[in-house]
Amino acid sequence: MKPWIKSIFLMEVKNILTYRFEFWMNFLGGTAANFLIAYFLWNFIFEAQGLTTLNGYSIQGMTLYYLIAPLTLRVMDADSMGFISREVYDGSLNKYLIYPVEIFIYKWISYMVRGCFYLLQLFVLLGFFLLIVGAPKEFSITPTSIGIFLGFATLIMVVYFFMVASIEMISFWADNIWSLRVFVFLLVSFLGGSAIPLSFFPEWSMPILKILPFRSMVYLPTQFLLGKHFELIGEALLTLSLWGIGFCLALNFLWKKGMKQYTGVGM
Amino acid sequence: MIKVENITQTFKVAEKEPGFMGSLKGLVKRKWMTKYALKNINLEIQSGEIVGLIGANGAGKTTLIKILTGIIYPTAGKASVIGYNPWERDNRLRRKVSLIMGQKAQLWWDLPAMDCFYLLKDIYQIPDNEFHADLKNLAEKLNISHQLKVQVRSLSLGERMKVELMAALLHRPEIIFLDEPTIGLDISSQKAIRKFLRDYHTEYKPIIILTSHYMEDIEELCDRVVIVKEGQIIYDGDLDKIVNKMGQEKTIYAHLKNKISIHDLNQFPATLGSISIVDEMSLKINTKSELIPGAVTELLAKFPVMDLNIEAQDISDTIEKLMKEGISKT
């Protein structure tokens, strides 16, 4: 391993820990708000309908799903909004072009460190949940399910990185891609099952969801962590691998084309 | 050595009509215009030279630096920087080059300078003993040792520029590009940076390419200047020769007994030189040596002169004139 890889890793950790208030707000604030909204909404639905289970989920199980799935999305996204485009627009990209480093290795390490920070957050909050509420009957979180989830977390951090980095390349041609990134994030959240579990989607949408990479990025890893659908591991691996290769090729192509458009503005 | 052959750079720039309707039209259809940043630039720089790249804003100086550092691709032409094509971004070249941008921080904003230096040590694979020796040496020479543990964002502009310089020199580059390194600094910081750069060049002899709007930077550091105007080189040669080429020009400074207005300047014949107000009680005349007797006679006759002083013309005035009027290439 090149020595600068370790240094960038450590530097990114220091970056995250530099601002105490931001650290704790990020760690607890955003997650708590999302979690409470989901809890009260589903609690109301279960009580209003007089249900004990819905599509195989108890209220505890549903609450746990809404803890894990959005955090899995957060692990994968890792604050990547604008992580290259912002630097194209203000000229900070120049730094990576002058230093003898590979820009995408550099960027991936920074992104991965943030992803690991959210992964830690996920397991801390999961621990609290299991301690306070207990494990829902329909799920079985075991060392095996945790191991499979961690393997998938690593893979999706590679595939999603290639995907969003490819989208960020559009900044070489477009004035502002912020709305596009927000749209893609919402799309991944919806089609990945972070907003609503995919088992609630209509039957006709299933073939489409299977082809797209998002189910294998959020919904299936969440299910694997909860100890369910292990039979879909192979399918998820294949889907992610194929999309990963496609995104990697797209990124390579767009980077080469984009660099010919780059003007290094802001310098 | 740096060799640039027929480099041309064009940019496509969006045009938008003014007003609300212009903004609406821009949403549907956008007009583009092609702008030349550089036109057929040819340049050779030998090892150990310090070259001042000067010109007005938008003349193309920074674009040329971006091409030579491999940040952007030129539209046409070739360049070789110590044997490498810069825009292929070969790591062997990148280890020998540094770029300092006065207007843009390159260090990691949220970290202390020292953390940034350790990262650069790993990026450039600098041996431990060399790193620590150079770090100490540079920090002492720049008088910044006490600020290395402070977050970069908390440093003053002058201190930030000093740590940027340290960061750029730790790997002992063979070529240093300095893009307005003293911009916005106070006089004493400017002097300190200039002295440091002069001493550093004497010791290590790197190629230094410097852009600056401060003529003191150019005069004190550069033997050779390249003047760029509207994307073309209009002068490439010794700094001293510029003055000779433009004629032995002098500046007459006159301190007056009474206040004068800009309209009073019309009394002075333009054939004897260009007259301008320095402040309400003094004026200056730029003229050629042989015209001084006539200019002084006219000045004494037409203005309430209390005191006179004749000096060799300021280099910045000469270069400004050059950029306005142009000159054939050397």
Image: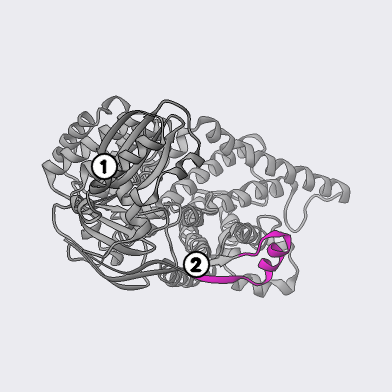
Tell me which amino acid carries mark 2: Leu
How far across and how far down the image is residue B104, in percent? 40, 45
What label does residue A237 carry, if any?
2
Taking depth in this image into account, of B155 and B222 the one nearest to the observer is B222
Q: How many marks?
A: 2
**Residue at left 46%, top 39%?**
A16
Q: Label 1: chain? A: B
**Range of magenta residues:** B16-34
Q: Which residue is mark 1?
A: B293
Q: What quarter of the picture does the N terminus of chain B occupy?
A: bottom left
How far across and how far down the image is residue A96, in percent? 36, 54
Q: Label 2: chain? A: A
Question: Is residue B119 rendered to the left or right of residue A43?
Answer: left
Taking depth in this image into account, of B260 and A63 the one nearest to the observer is B260
How far across and how far down the image is residue B12, in percent? 49, 69
Residue B148 in sight from this viewpoint = no
Tell me which amino acid carries mark 1: Pro
Element marked by disc 2: helix
What label does residue B307 carry, if any?
none
Vertical placement of B239 versus B141: above or below? Answer: below
Q: Is residue A196 magenta?
A: no
Dot 2 surroundings within 10 Å: few (below 14), some, or many (20 or more)? some
